[in-house]
Image (tube, rainbow, N blue to C red):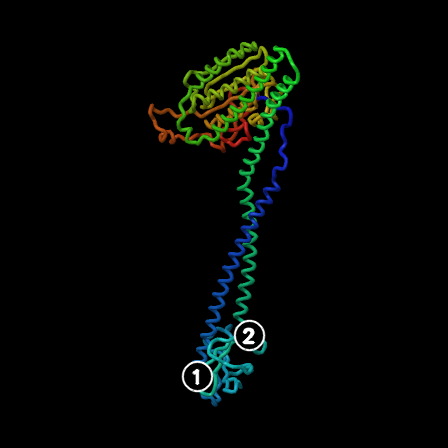
Amino acid sequence: MSGRRTDPGPVLVGAPGRDGRRAHAAKVAGVATVVVALVVAVVALVFNTVVIDHLDTSVDLRLADQLGDASALEPGGGLVVPSSAPDRDVDTAPVFLWRVSSSGAARPVTVGAPALPRREWNRGPTELTVAGSTFRFVSQSTASGWLVAGSSVRQVQRVSTELTVAELLLGGVLLVSTFVGALVVGLRASAPVEAMRRAQAEFTADASHELRTPLSVIRAEVDLALGRRRSADSYRATLERVGDEGRRLQSIVDDLLWLAREEAAPPERTRTHERVDLAAVAEATAQRFAAVADAAGQHLVVEHGARGAAVVQATPESLQRLASVLVDNACRYAGAGGTIRVATGLTGGRATLSVEDSGPGIPEDERHRIFDRFHRASDEPGGTGLGLAIADAVVRRTHGRWSVGRSNLGGARVAVAWRRPPLHPAGLGSSELEEHPDPLEPSSPARPAGDGEPGASWVHPGGHPMPGAE
């Protein structure tokens, strides 16, 4: 039923494929991971600073408490201050006290206190390395010098190390998860965009190929006509061929413009559709193509059920265009003396429009491609390769479903089924119509045509993304 180009057509060169898409997604995921890493590093730095500062403050308070308790000791007394209070946690580092003379000599006050180096003491916390460990000191001036309290901060350092290790482990897991998640999301998000880009590139290449053919013929004819003097009849024949190619070129451009307008139309346009009787559409289309069928000696018949039973919510113009495409293809491929049958009716509660012919039919391995733009299913001349693309746009717009198979006439059978619109009184607004959602959900399973035709099978529901369309 649909024309088919036998040459491979234009080949896209240099178009980025799956590898390019993966590289781009990996790059985006890498940038996202770097950003997350910087945020995690800043948050970890702030958190560690707050925690260590809190621990240091706790040590300073303990040292200050010990200095307060020890300030009443006589400088020359032999009283030994406990190295840690009995109510402290067993993991708490002990506090040591020293008395430092004005000359800098330090005398331990508590048992086990390490020797202090000579240095200048002043008020405020100080950290020094004593006996191989880092101590934190707080001092208080006395009449004879200084009273110094100190405690090891090894536990604070241990907490800092444990925090750092935990943050590195958790941060590594977070960064790996971020990269993998961003990569997966990027690949999935870019898949529809890449599909649209490739479809647009292929369409542009196909359109350029199809437009170039008539232009090349026109240029060749003109060059030959101007190459040498010819008779008036020869010039007339040349002009007729140029005119034919010009009309073909105009037909391609008109079809492309129609497709562009149809696909760019907003979804809200469907709310202005009318209730159209498919029987009337079939009769009008048959009358239009009666002369074409007679010229080829073909038998064009129309069969339909009760008038008014097969009703579709659509615009009459779009259904007329759909029927015209199907009947035009049937007349082209039925051959001289062939038969074309146009039928309407109800099948399984759905309104159907089918067109059959006695031509060669459509091979099964070609049926999934007949809606591709500029695709032709045979070597039969004529046509632009856009007819079924236009028909598919109408079916998608009206939420119909395609059925492609073999007719008992011997050729192809192409049918469309629509869910019948709900009955409603005249003047019912679009808001009430919205209460009856279209039942042909995208997830609806494919099913047989159900009318007993051999080889019939549902190809795809209208409204699903398809690569192009004849």
Earlier residue among tags 1 and 2: 1
Which is nearer the eye, 160 or 105?
105
Q: Is residue 75 visible?
A: yes
Residue lying at 42% horizontally and 16% vertically, measured from the top left: 307
* Residue 71, numbered circle: 1
- Which image quadrant is residue 196 in? top right
Q: Is residue 160 left or right of residue 311?
A: right
Which is nearer the eye, 186 or 247?
247
Q: Quadrant of the N terminus?
A: top right
Residue lying at 59% horizontally and 11% vertically, measured from the top left: 336
**Badge 2 amino acid:** Thr
Total numbered circles: 2
Q: Are marks 1 and 2 in contact (CB under 8 Å)?
A: no
Q: Quadrant of the C terminus?
A: top right
Which is nearer the eye, 220 or 178?
220
For the residues labelled 1 and 2, the Cα–Cα distance comes to 24 Å
**Badge 1 amino acid:** Ser
Residue 432 locus on image (x, y percent): 35, 30
* Residue 134, numbered circle: 2
Q: Which residue ends up furthest to the right in the rendered image? A: 228
